[in-house]
Image (cartoon, rainbow, N blue to C red):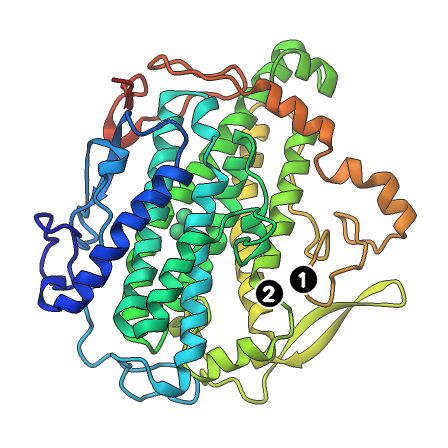
């Protein structure tokens, strides 16, 4: 596998210069992408110099280079993991056949839909996070926000490359449409609902990168199993970048919790009013944000019973998380899986064909992974000597998609009446008042080494730089 050629207009490791038509098409898309970035990317950031990592190879040892970059000059490129000789499809009805290097005609529409849906989430999150830089709690955090943003931009490039290279004219049209939809827009919204929600403050941002970027991890992992080899190789490299996004989320929430616990101990109180008056975010509010982001994110996995999910799997387009580590026949006929539904005011499990429940399988894998991090947050509280604990809400809580949509379920998993829901929802999900309080904390801290009052400093800096390093330069 060759390194990445940065002398070209579009850095890439796919020998773009050997395919002139493709290169021209992408070079034509590039200014439209930059126009989108300037309009919808990080607000008032174009003059900043940011200490960013840029991919310089796909070698797991040392793929990244760190340096100061003006963001509009970031080198967004196209990088695929190396091709594995003789790779075979390892699940579904084509099991054992050679992996596809071109799009099979019969699966073209489904593959395009999968790629467009994934691609749409990437610019959407940049749009959602557009204003956060103006209220950053530190230069360190500002840099991390921008790192996530440029990489989501690169993930869009990754999907657009596939659309341009393998889907001809309709692929090019889809690539344009990816720059036209807007997060939260009434008339032309992003495809998936979680990507139309607002990310108005940094607590939301950290919850989003913890939960919603983790959805990204699981979707990419399932697609990196794909029988369509270019998609698999693209997603493998994207996963490398995704890990940092989830780190930003996990450590961000962890630092907020740490700071809150410090103040709880100083003031010897757990009363939200007193803690808020001291300028930190009380744990019940953090729990409500957690409930919101968890529930909105698990909806992204789709309906619990889905014939599309069965088709994608059987056709070899989208596997399960860690497909190759599973000990079954990788075809799944005759197997069943339990999904939840509400019957006469109770949640009951129902066995359905596993092929139809693959969204639920992936959602359950996601939930397991999410809960592990919540446990690490609880360790911070435990270390501070405090008895409180955070929890993932029940998976039926606040659902909008699948058979649980429209059923009112409390975070502890009781089906509740509409009246009880209306009365108690303010204990379970952030209220306008909670959001206004969190918003009131959002100032802008840009002195190197200084942090907003509501968040603890990180344990260490980026790329072994000190915490008080000037991660962003303003001139
Ligand atoms: Fe992404
Ligand atoms: Fe991400």
Give the percent coordinates (x, y) of residue 272: 72, 20
- Tell me the CA gap for discs 1 and 2: 6 Å
Q: Which SS class for mark 1?
A: loop
Judging depth in this view, the residue of 396 and 179 nearest the camera is 179
Position of residue 455 in the picture relative to residue 302 (left or right): left
> Is there CB contact under 8 Å for labels 1 and 2?
yes
Q: Residues within 10 Å of mark 1 (few under 14, many from 20)?
A: some
Q: Position of residue 147 (x, y in %)?
A: 33, 37
N-term mark: 1 or 2: 2
Q: Is residue 386 above or below residue 429?
A: above
Q: Which residue is mark 2?
A: 302
- Secondary element at tag 2: loop
Asked if the beta carbon under badge 2 is closer than 8 A to the nearest atom of ligand 1, the reply is no
- Residue under circle 1? 401
Task: Residue 385: tell me if it is visible.
Answer: no
Q: Is residue 193 visible?
A: yes
- Residue at image position (72%, 57%) is 396
Where, by quadrant of the figure, is residue 383 drawn? Answer: top right
In the rendered image, residue 230, in percent from the top left (x then y), is placed at 27, 70
Residue drawn at (48%, 16%) of the image? 452
Question: Is residue 239 shown above or below 337?
Answer: above
Residue at screen point 24% across, 29% down: 464
**113 or 58, which lies in front?**
113
Q: Quadrant of residue 300?
A: bottom right
């Amino acid at each position: 596998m060759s390194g990445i050629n940065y002398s070209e207009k579009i850095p890439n490791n796919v020998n773009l210069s050997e395919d002139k038509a493709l290169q021209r098409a992408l070079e034509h898309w590039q200014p439209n992408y930059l126009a989108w970035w300037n309009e919808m990317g990080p607000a008032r950031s174009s003059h900043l110099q940011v200490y960013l990592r840029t991919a310089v190879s796909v070698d797991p040892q040392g793929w990244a280079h760190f340096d100061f970059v003006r963001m509009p000059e970031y080198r967004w490129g196209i990088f695929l993991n190396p091709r594995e000789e003789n790779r075979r499809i390892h699940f579904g009805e084509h099991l054992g056949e050679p992996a596809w290097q071109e799009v099979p005609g019969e699966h073209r529409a489904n593959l395009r839909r999968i790629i467009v849906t994934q691609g749409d989430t990437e610019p959407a999150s940049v749009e959602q996070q557009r204003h956060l830089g103006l209220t950053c709690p530190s230069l360190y955090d500002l840099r991390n926000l921008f790192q996530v943003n440029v990489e989501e931009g690169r993930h869009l490039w990754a999907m657009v490359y596939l659309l341009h290279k393998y889907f001809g004219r309709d692929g090019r049209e889809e690539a344009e449409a990816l720059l036209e939809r807007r997060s939260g827009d009434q008339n032309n919204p992003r495809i998936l609902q979680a990507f139309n929600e607002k990310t108005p403050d940094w607590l939301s941002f950290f919850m989003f990168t913890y939960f919603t970027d983790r959805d990204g991890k699981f979707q990419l992992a399932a697609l990196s199993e794909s029988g369509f080899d270019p998609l698999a190789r693209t997603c493998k490299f994207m996963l490398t970048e995704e890990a940092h996004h989830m780190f930003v989320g996990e450590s961000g929430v962890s630092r907020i919790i740490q700071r809150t616990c410090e103040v709880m101990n100083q003031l010897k109180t757990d009363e939200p009013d007193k803690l808020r008056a001291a300028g930190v975010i009380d744990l019940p509010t953090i729990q409500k944000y957690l409930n919101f982001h968890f529930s909105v994110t698990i909806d992204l996995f789709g309906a619990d019973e889905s014939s599309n999910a069965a088709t994608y799997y059987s056709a070899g387009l989208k596997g399960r998380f860690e497909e190759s580590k599973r000990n079954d026949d990788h075809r799944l006929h005759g197997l069943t899986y339990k999904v939840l539904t509400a019957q006469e005011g109770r949640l009951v499990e129902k066995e359905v064909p596993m092929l139809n429940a693959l969204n639920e399988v992936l959602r359950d894998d996601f939930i397991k992974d999410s809960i592990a991090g919540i446990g690490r947050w609880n360790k911070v509280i435990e270390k501070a000597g405090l008895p409180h604990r955070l929890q993932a809400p029940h998976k039926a809580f606040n659902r909008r998609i699948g058979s649980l949509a429209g059923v009112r379920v409390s975070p502890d998993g009781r089906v509740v009446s509409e009246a009880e829901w209306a009365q108690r929802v303010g204990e379970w999900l952030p209220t306008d008042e909670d959001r206004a309080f969190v918003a009131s904390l959002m100032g802008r801290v840009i002195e190197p080494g200084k942090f907003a009052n509501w968040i603890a400093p990180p344990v260490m800096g980026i790329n072994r730089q000190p915490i008080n390093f000037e991660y962003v330069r303003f001139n």
